[in-house]
Image (spheres, grey):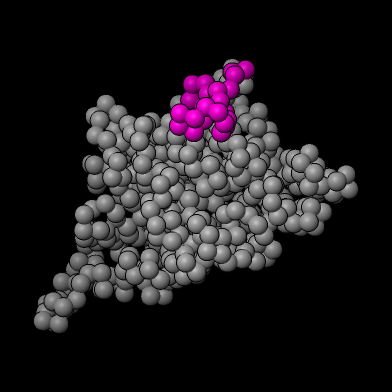
Amino acid sequence: MLYIVSSKSISFITRVATMEKNCFLLLSFLVLFPLLHGYTAFAAGTDDGSEQWGYVEVRPKAHLFWWLYKSPDRVEDPSNPWPILLWLQGGPGGSGVGFGNFLEIGPLDGNLQPRNSTWLRKADLLFVDSPVATGFSYVEDESLVVTTDDEAATDLTTLLKELFNGNETLQKSPLYIVAESYGGKFAVTLGLSALKAIEAGELKLQLGGVALGDSWISPEDFVLSWGPLLKDVSRLDGNGLNSSNRLALQIQQQLAEGQYKEATETFFDLENVISSSSNDVDFYNFMVDYANDPVISTSEGWNEVMMGRDPRYLGAKKSSSSNGASSKGDLPSLMDGPIREKLKIIPESVSWGGQGNLVFPAMAGDFMRPRIKEVDELLAKGINVTIYNGQLDVICSTKGAEAWLDKLKWGDLKTFLSMDRTPLYCGNDETTTKGFVKSYKNLFFYWILGAGHFVPVEQPCVSLEMVGNITRSPNLHS
């Protein structure tokens, strides 16, 4: 086990142990620490060092939980260091430690069985429950929940300083920030925040790149795409298209006037109009109804992502499919049961997602704010930016992603757009096209066919090859 504690906590333990030495010899740190508050950082891990996890107090009484997996497929190559991938979930309020880890890319699936397509084959994986109050992260005062993407990025930068600054091994590995959905807004703001800290000498870290998976970078462009896209695939008729376009244009006007909270309310109205006009199309995969989504319908735990957002999303049904959360089809039961028991450091007062209803309402004023400018800034600084999108997604549609891409002020955009795409296949099988990729200098765009919002789940083979390319993993052929 590895423990990292503050001097304040060590002093406290020493005094108590001196007073009641015989009694405290029977207690382990893992039993004691969940009862304490005020430490800056605390970590534990497996005996073989393959996993580490812990808390970082990023602000007084605000605690981020993280979980790091070291890849068993690591290749030691001094000329091409093994990468670390930081996964940021969406929502806002979705648990990366829960969803990204057990439902998408981690070493074990929701039934605690090995996942053949785990991204751990290409990189070490770092999951963080961010912002605070998400998943196992928590606040001791509800006023400490963040209200903007920038505030969330500041907290994440504090966490990275705690993890990387004193660890030369981690410092040798380039960090790739990979995000899904709303996590994309966190990723670009974190990328810039981390770069600023690196340039100031405050953060010892190599930023390898930022990858935006089906990311909510420009809400305006996405909502304007919904009606035309769904009309083209026959989920809306002319009446539904007119109704959705009217609300999308209202959102466009509200955003132009800086009315971000009002735009969030209209966003809900638009979702409801589309749902009723399409007989409840799935916003994450237009090929199916919401109730039959191949990913979210497998776990009641998805409810935690949408908590405090749209009540329509609180009806995800239970299932025991291979993509599911556990044998009960219930991700909260997995996280607050076997996983909590394994981790041992989760405070008794904290349940997984127990504060999730705080996050979205707090961020309602930033939810519809675009982050195209931040993408431009990353490109201008020479940071590799990858955009990947599932063909069947609605909420962060490829049509919308292409629209905001066209708005970039990056000097090489015209050349990028003029490039031809390269087809993607799965392994050596070139009989079926799995996607396309286009790249120029430090901008990359992947079109992933046959996938909706959750690309790693719906197209695991080509996704794994893609992430190997993104991270420049030395283990490209595993």
Q: Residue at x 41, y 34 (%)?
A: 468
Task: Confirm whether the magenta stretch covers residue 422.
Answer: yes
Q: Residue at x 54, y 51 (%)?
A: 90
Residue 150 appears in the rendering: no
Q: Residue furthest right?
A: 239
Q: Is residue 235 left or right of residue 78?
A: right
Bounds of the magenta segment: 418-444
Q: Quadrant of the N terminus?
A: bottom left
Question: As rendered, which of 393 and 272 lies closer to the eye?
Answer: 393
Residue 301, placed above or below residue 394: below
Spot occupied by residue 117 in the image (x, y as percentages of width and height): 43, 45
Spot occupied by residue 75 in the image (x, y as percentages of width and height): 27, 35
Residue 436 appears in the rendering: yes
Q: Quadrant of the C terminus?
A: top left
Spot occupied by residue 477 in the image (x, y as percentages of width and height): 36, 32
Spot occupied by residue 240 in the image (x, y as percentages of width and height): 84, 49
Q: Is residue 404 left or right of residue 86?
A: right
Say which quarter of the image contains residue 80: top left
